Structures are given as C-alpha cells and as structure tokens.
C-alpha cells in the first residue's frame, strides 16, 4: 500500500508540474492542438516522470494532506515559471503586432478564434503565427518537453517554486518586449512616414478628408511592409526564444 501511495504521489506532483505548459490556454504553445491530444501528451510525460523519479519527496498521506497540497501548489508555480519561456516571446510579439493594428487602422476588424474563444486582430494573428512557425520549425517544442522531463532530476518533485527573482523577471520582460518591437519596427516606421504625409496633406488641403482617403493606403502598406519585414524576422524571433529558454529553464538543461 505504501508503494502505491508513493507512485500516486509522484504521479500527481509530476502532473501538477507539467499541466500549466500543456493545458492552460494562456501558457501553452500547443493551444491549437485538441485538448484530448494535449491530455495524452500530459499523461505520457507524467508516466515518464514516474519512471525517472521512483520516490516522492513529499509522501501522499490522507491523514495529513496539507504538506502534499502545498507541494502540489509549488509544482504548479514551477510549471508556470517554465511556461514563461514560451509565454514571454509570444506576448512580446502579440503586443508589437497590436500596435501595428492600431497604427494601420485595422484594429476594428478582428477574427474570432474558436480555439481560444476570443477575437484576435489581423496583424497580431499574422505575427503570432509567424512566431509559432519559427518555434516549431526550430524544434524548440521538443527541447521544451525534454527540459520539462530533465527538470525532474534537477529540481526534485515536491520542491518546486519560482525559478527567477522578480528583479530578473522584470529585466527579462523589458528585453523581450524590446526584441518584439524590433520585429515590427520597419512596419511602424513606414506607417509613421505615411502618417506624416497625410498630416502634411491635410494641412495643405483642409477641404479634402485626407484621413479617409489615406486609410486604404495605410492598410495596404501595413500588410506589404509586414510581409517584407517578416522575411528577416526569424533570426530575431529565434533569439527571443533562446534568451527566454536560458532564463526560465533549470540550470543544466540543454
């Protein structure tokens, strides 16, 4: 009976560590994958972790459940910390793309995403899909899953917690969002030049409604410039993911 309790404890602790990466919609890069497939991957990773770690640092005790519940909470926090390696680059890309939506005037036109049940902007969807394409084409999803399994040996089950201090997290936030703005910077500068031209035209010809005349031009120019800048964006997006992986993965995981 003690052996069964130990295996159940290891299984639950490992599942608590892996669940944020695979099952929480806002923290998973596999959000487009059906939930049943993600659950199968979660169970497979958990069973592999049970084979790697045969003993639980915090045993499952029905009479005194509080230590085990606290250990599971710590494992969830560690899982969210590991998921930040994917969340921060995607959030930075999404933020910069939403700036483009507002600047180009297409923010009013949105697409409904049935997987997330939320409305998404046009340019934001294009840039985020480009980021996901780079993520999967470089094999970083396999590296992330291997790192989650390797974390069992580096950080024993039951001793999870935050990987970084708030100061380090804030510094990484600033660098990630700066890199995200660099992806969209050529398009922003091009749209800003068009805005300057429209402003000059409206001052020269106040009787003409230059804003509505230039709006289709801004939309077309925004997508043309975005398509041209995304051609050179993959190395920068790769740098974003690599920097995030070096900070939010346990030391020793390669």
Image: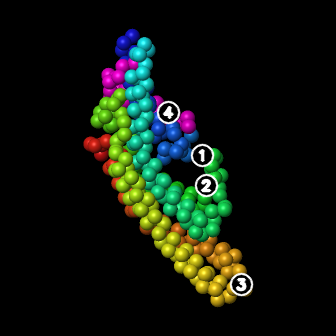
User: Gap between marks 1 and 4, in whole Å?
Assistant: 20 Å
Q: Is residue 40 left or right of residue 173?
A: right
What residue is shown at x 36% (from left), y 12% (from top)? 2
Q: Are marks 2 and 1 in contact (CB under 8 Å)?
A: yes
Dominant SS of magenta comes to helix
Which residue is tagged 4? 40
What residue is shown at x 48% (from left), y 54% (from top)? 91
Q: Residue furthest left?
A: 252
Q: Are marks 2 and 3 in contact (CB under 8 Å)?
A: no
Q: Secondary structure at mark 1?
A: loop
What residue is shown at x 58% (from left), y 64% (from top)? 101
Q: Earlier in the sequence, mark 1 or mark 4?
A: 4
Which residue is tagged 1? 116
Along the line of sight, which residue is nearer the eye, 10 or 65?
A: 65
Which callout, 3 or 4, points to the residue nearer the camera?
A: 3
Q: Residue furthest front?
A: 167
Which callout, 1 or 3, points to the residue nearer the camera?
A: 3
Quadrant where the C terminus sits is top left
Disc marking residue 208: 3
Along the line of sight, which residue is nearer the eye, 160 or 126?
A: 160
Along the line of sight, which residue is nearer the eye, 166 or 189?
A: 166
Q: Are marks 1 and 4 in contact (CB under 8 Å)?
A: no
The percent coordinates of residue 27 (x first, y second) are 49, 44
């Amino acid at each position: 009976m003690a052996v069964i309790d130990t295996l159940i404890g290891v299984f639950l602790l490992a599942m608590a560590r892996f669940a944020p990466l695979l099952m929480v919609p806002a923290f998973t890069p596999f959000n487009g994958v059906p939930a049943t497939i993600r659950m199968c991957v979660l169970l497979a990773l958990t069973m592999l972790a049970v084979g790697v770690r045969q003993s639980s640092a915090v045993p499952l005790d029905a009479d005194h459940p509080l230590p085990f519940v606290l250990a599971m909470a710590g494992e969830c926090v560690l899982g969210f910390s590991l998921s930040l390696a994917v969340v921060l680059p995607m959030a930075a890309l999404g933020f910069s793309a939403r700036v483009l939506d507002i600047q180009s005037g297409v923010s009013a036109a949105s697409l409904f995403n049935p997987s997330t049940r939320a409305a998404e902007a046009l340019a934001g969807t294009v840039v985020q899909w480009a980021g996901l394409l780079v993520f999967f084409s470089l094999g970083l999803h396999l590296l992330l899953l291997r790192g989650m399994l390797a974390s069992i040996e580096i950080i024993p089950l039951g001793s999870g917690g935050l990987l970084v201090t708030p100061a380090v997290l804030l510094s990484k936030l600033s660098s990630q969002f700066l890199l995200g703005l660099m992806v969209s910077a050529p398009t922003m500068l091009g749209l800003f030049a068009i805005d300057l031209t429209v402003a000059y035209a409206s001052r020269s010809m106040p009787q003409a409604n230059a804003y509505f005349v230039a709006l289709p031009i801004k939309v077309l120019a925004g997508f043309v410039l975005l398509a041209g800048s995304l051609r050179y964006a993959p190395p920068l997006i790769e740098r974003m993911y690599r920097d995030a992986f070096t900070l939010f993965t346990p030391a020793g995981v390669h």
